[in-house]
Amino acid sequence: MAARSDDPLDVGHSAGLVVDARGTILRSTPAAESLLGRSAAELSGGRLQDLLAVPGSWPALLEQRDGPVWEGRAELAPHLGGEVEFRVLPLSGEGPAEEFLVLAAPQVLAAQWRQGHAFLRELFLQDRIGLAVFDNELRLVRTNTHLLPYLGVPDELYGARLGDFLQEADARAVDTRLRDVLTTGTPLVGFDIDVHTQVEPGAGRTMSISAFRLQGANGHVIGVTGLFVDVTDQKLSRLRLDVLHRATAVLSTTLSAAESAQDLADVLVPALADVAVVDVAEAVFTYDEPAPEDHGDHLLRRTAVAGAAPGGFATGTVFDVSTGGTLSDRMWSHRSEEGAEPADVLGRPHGMSTWLRARGSLLGRIRVGRGLDRPPFTGDDLDLLAETASRAALVVDNARRYARERNAAVGLQRSLLPSSTTDTAAAHTASVYLPTDTATGASGDWFDVIPLSSARVALVVGDVVGHGLRATATMARLRTAVRTLADLDLDPDELLTHLDDLVSELAIGTEDAEASFGSFGATCLYVTYDPVTRQCLAASAGHPPPALVAPDGTAAHVDLSPGPPLGVGGLPFEPVAFEAADGSVLALCTDGLITRGRPDPDEGMAALRHALSAALASGRPLEEIGPEVVGELAPRPLADDVTLLLAGVRGVAPQDHASWTLAADPSVVSDARAHVLAQLSLWGLDDLAFTTELVASELVTNSVRYAGGPIGLRLIRTSSLICEVSDVSNTQPRMRRARDTEEGGRGLFLVAQLTDRWGSRYTRSGKTIWTEQALPPGP
């Protein structure tokens, strides 16, 4: 079957009539029979004007003739097909014998053909889309001048292949896609590829290729048409937006200036540059105010490096930068600054830098560099870096402000807590305190180690409800109250009762009644240890019980009956007594250590016992064991504050204390002096014999005179010499200045003058008056 033209007035498929000079129809084509709805016999011999809707318009049509070949438009009779376009071609002859070929087609088809032809012509003339027609061998047979608008594309492309001017790999990739279109007929839409010419490989251009197969009128495949759109700028814009988006995302994940700087550098490489260096003002890390922008000299710290950085760019280096008061963003290139020092361009031929500025202060600098395998930076790249720097500067400044506030809050809280380790005659303690990861870093956990009279010690751990500075302030008030009450030598249950009353009063006095418990509610565990008797007395206000690890490594929690949290009131606190052998370890903690990821507190307490037994078995000091146990049971980040207080208790050896029971008779005063002198001589403390004899004499005399018997006398030798006198009276002694005319009233005054410390405490059977004297220096 012969190929036909798409032209509707082409002889191949238009309606054709052969007429003479007078318009008589001599012959017709099958297409004419189909168009006019008449057979060839019916048409033969008829006249053209009889086919018109208005036969009288025939002369007017003849007048349109402007040469041997002419075209026009006519309206056929309604039953013949409507408006048509025609073309007249002379055949042969002269005068009446002359014959003409009249070709006609419906006006709609002719208009569509003209529109398609115009569209194709204009498509090849436009300069925004590269258009190429390939034959079945993928040779270029037609193209416009913007196929690939950069160096290396020849002017004459007819018969050329893509491999004649593109890099081999690029040409092969495009040819593969075009051949798929030829083979399958499936159009290719929006295939992006980076292409490089053989003349200038460089970074190349990103082309978006679309293609569709071409078929002739007979259905045979005759080639493929490709549309090439340069989307390099759009791709770069998307990449820049992506870099900005990723930078914004990573900058919002942390409030650490160092981590934010490193995250930002990792985003810039390799998306924007081959190497990136971020320097942050030293004031950010020292909690100081950074220098203003117009200050000439600035102290920066190398904070983050990403990419293949040359030597000398290690993080942590602190150096001075002189800006002369001018902070301008800049780009450089090996073409414009051949003499630039490598330190200024990060060892790369292309580079740019911008400053981190926020709220009138200079917070740092960002520098990036590229190698020769990438194009130089552009103004758009510098704008991107400046926009990224502006966002990073706000993050760094916020991190600085947060770090300063957090450092102040944590410093305040730590100043309110005792030393992490203490060493007394009764116990050696080591503690671990970790505030929860909140905005301020402050919390309401606290612990304390309080020396008591007679070589005893009190161990305290508490937890205020909530976090932040309000909880810290409440913690400070409670710790002060506990220390004040401990100075009265109260039993744990009595102390917690007084503390509970205090918390209730604080809650009632809070202006915001709804937040009263959230501000002042707390739990507390109070434990006392007597190294002479090895007895512990503990009471809890809603706090987890202590764990006791025996010298043989067995661990158990003390069976306490915790009372309500402080501030609730209404219920008593029950004291529990237990023995702690010499060398045992007491562990007091807050619930943040045992409830981390464990809904059942018993499970957390069991884990604590196991961790303590395993760690103490190594024989290492408590200062090492505490952080190990906390790290195992409460890994970061913390959901709650964590406090662990470890106390290795020590007993006073039997040979270091002595006690006597005396009757309430004045004659026992001499016996008391004799007992004291004999014991001090046995201990080799004759230097303290006179003062101790006098102190014991005065205290026993007062008990005989005012309290009655029995009277207890006890001497304890630890880091100091302790003398105790106990009686059954609940009347506390009061020191006063006696008048010159009075014979008595000077005993306690003498005791206070002769000893380093003295005091009295209530007992379940009366009271005890105690004194302490420093031991003389040893040999």
Image (spheres, rainbow, N blue to C red):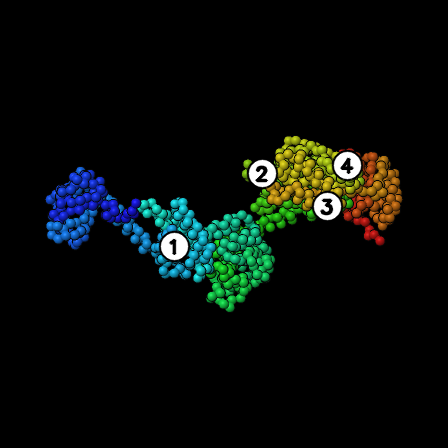
1 and 4 marks in contact (CB < 8 Å): no
Q: Which of the two labelled residues, at mark 1 and mark 4, occupies the earlier sequence position?
A: 1
Q: Name the residue beneath numbered marker 1.
A: 139
Instruction: Say which quadrant the N terminus sits in.
Output: top left
Three-letter amino acid code of the residue under disc 1? Arg
In contact (CB < 8 Å): disc 1 and disc 2: no
Closer mark to the observer between disc 1 and disc 2:
1
In the rendered structure, which disc, 1 or 2, sits on the residue that comes first in sequence? Answer: 1
Residue at the far bottom in the pictured view? 339
- Is 708 placed left or right of 546 in the picture? right
Residue closer to the observer: 95 or 267 = 95
Tell me residue 83's x, y (percent).
Answer: 19, 43
Residues under labels 3 and 4: Cα distance?
A: 21 Å
Q: Which mark is residue 628?
A: none
Q: Residue at x 66, y 41 (%)?
A: 633
Q: Are marks 3 and 2 in contact (CB under 8 Å)?
A: no
User: Which amino acid type corresponds to the residue marked 2 in the rendered image?
Assistant: Gly
Disc 3 on helix, strand or loop? helix
